[in-house]
Amino acid sequence: MTKDKTRGFLQFKRTLPKKRAVEERLQDSKEIYYPFPEEYLIQQSSRCMDCGVPFCHAGCPLGNKIPEWNDLVFKERWQEAYHKLASTNNFPEFTGRICPAPCEAACVLGINDDPVTIEQIEKEIIEHAFDAGWVVPATPEVRTGKRVAVVGSGPAGLACAAQLNEAGHAVTVFERDDKPGGLLQYGIPDFKLEKSVVARRVALMEAAGIVFKTGVRVGEDISVEELMAFDAVVLCVGATQARDVGAPGRDLEGIHLAWDYLWQQNKRVASESFDVPAIDAADKNVIVIGGGDTGSDCVGTANRQGAKSVIQFELLPTPPEDRPAHQPWPYYPMVLRTSSSHEEGADRKWSVLTTNFKGDNGKLTHLTTVNVEMEKDATGRMVLNEMEGTKKQWPVDLVVLAVGYTGPEKAGLLDKLDVVLTDRGNIDTTDGYATSVPGVFAAGDGRRGQSLVVWAISEGREAAAAADAYLMEESRLPQKGEGDIPFIR
């Protein structure tokens, strides 16, 4: 084992855990990676150069103190590494598994070599801490007597609730689904994030005094008046209004939104029942429309369900393999990424626009596409132009629409609260995360638009500090990159 950290980045190449064989992992919904030997992890931590200006800090929306905990891992001071990591990130077990790691894109070593395996080290620190029994309920010593409602239990809601509870407030989290977790519980497949990981964290939060009320639609099952009886409210409702494809034939049987598809599969894997018709890719020709992470999750799900074939369409052109000139280091580059789901089998098509769906007796049988190219119009705006002679018909039994989300759902709670929305349909807030309704704050995708889990956690923390300051005139909750010592009022 190396003891020379000054040459680690020269001595060792970037290494990640080995994946289970495709044939094996398609037979279950478990995480796909084998355990990573500690010796290799310490070697990887030695690659961190402890830069004078650590750009990885800026790359991380949470301001994680990455070189500090990398160095502590190298020195095998695991408990200190855990405390350093947990001081800025409530849920490293989530980000260590599903974050696209913008910190790694900003790693100085990445200028002329492969970046440090920051995300993997993060995951190993928190799992080491759980195994050692260091992760315990963060119960405040003193309660303030203030009651706060958090609406939504996705990553933003969980982070917000955790911070407000540490500040001493009595926190109740309302979730409309059967279990807490939101996107983490029902939108991300188990092969990326096993739900036992979510349940483990929720149990800790409950033990710390946070109350979760599931199966509750705020604005329907409880009134807005009951909600506003709390001393403060934080809306962490997510961006759950799915973008659709308005092509002719959209109403045919066999066309489904990605959320509905993934939600069902997560319920199925957890042996939970649902009262809607089943969506199953077994022995079907499947086309996933949308080339992002959600589309990739649908590809992996279809393969595990035994699809006959899986094709994935993306409207945009094929990304470059290397950083484009307009996205230099340390910016997060839009380059070609191949996920584990793609490795399991998918024919990816780029610059493809779906123009219509066709079927027999109300059931989908084919769809038609045309290739497109993007050009600037006279105003400088990018527009899509259909390419002549590229029309094509595809046989298909199941289409999954993974083309993103347009913002939070307006009907119900937001309409009844009468909060002001932005031009893009998101919840409008001030710099302090306050909405137009006094005492009501907002965080996460419902405020900023569809984004990353790591951004949701960051926003949840920031909104908690804003709500705490509203309740107590000032807040000592840590801001981005702050907080070596867990806060207790």
Image (cartoon, grey):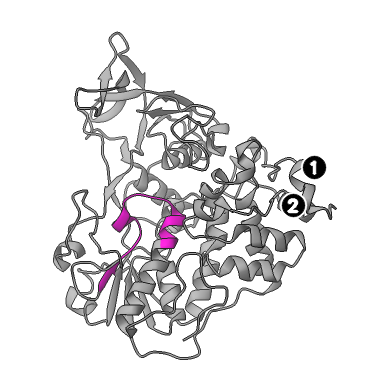
Identify the secondary structure beneath mark 1. Answer: helix
Q: Quadrant of residue 375?
A: top left
On the image, numbered disc 2 is attached to which residue? 46
Label 2 crowd bin: few (<14), some (14–19), many (20+), radius 10 Å: many
Q: Toward the viewer: 397 or 142?
A: 142
Identify the secondary structure beneath mark 2. Answer: helix
On the image, numbered disc 1 is attached to which residue? 11
Label 1 crowd bin: few (<14), some (14–19), many (20+), radius 10 Å: few
Residue type of the residue flagged with mark 1: Gln
Q: Quadrant of residue 13?
A: top right
Whole-percent x, y for residue 145 in the image: 35, 90
Whole-percent x, y for residue 227 in the image: 23, 76
Whole-percent x, y for residue 99 in the image: 51, 50
Q: Which residues are magenta?
A: 440-458
Q: Residue at x 70, y 48 (%)?
A: 34
Magenta span contains residue 442 = yes
